[in-house]
Image: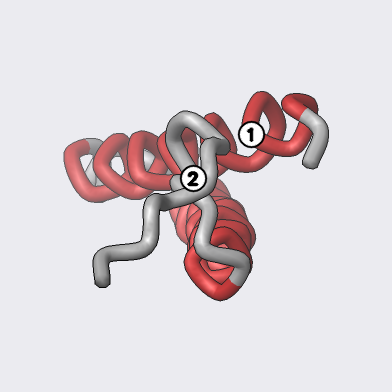
Amino acid sequence: MKKRKIVFFMPLFWIGLLLQNIGLIFRNELPDFAYGFLQGLSFVFIVAGFLFMCWCLRKRINPITLKEWESRQ
């Protein structure tokens, strides 16, 4: 697996969480369109990161370091 995937997908996940929190903190100050846009964008980023983590777990790869797990027998 290329290291580019982790550089792309893991920050997306964290940016999605950050956008969600920013939207919740400034919920009353933001116009409805901006609030909805932040929530939608954060949802897309979180789902993309979550799917990448699920793919890594299915391949038995640590999504943080991209190294294969040792099997415990």
Quadrant of res 11: top right
Residue type pointed to by label 1: Ile
Whether residue 29 sits left or right of residue 10 in the image: it is left
Where residue 46 appears, as percent x and y from the top left, is: 49, 57
Residue at image point 42% right, 36% down: 14
Where residue 73 appears, as percent x and y from the top left, is: 26, 71
Residue 33 in view of the camera:
no
Where residue 53 appears, as percent x and y from the top left, is: 51, 59
Which disc, if any, is residue 6? 1
Query: Foreground residue, 11 or 62?
Result: 62
Query: Foreground residue, 26 or 48?
Result: 48
Residue 56 in view of the camera:
yes
Residue type pointed to by label 2: Pro
Residue at image point 35% right, 49% down: 20
Q: Secondary structure at mark 1?
A: helix
Check whether the beta carbons of the residues at disc 2 and disc 1 lie within 8 A of each other.
Answer: yes
Neighbours of disc 2 within 10 Å: few (<14), some (14-19), many (20+): many
Residue matched to label 2: 63
| Residue 63 in the image: above or below residue 14 | below
Whether residue 38 sits left or right of residue 22 in the image: it is right
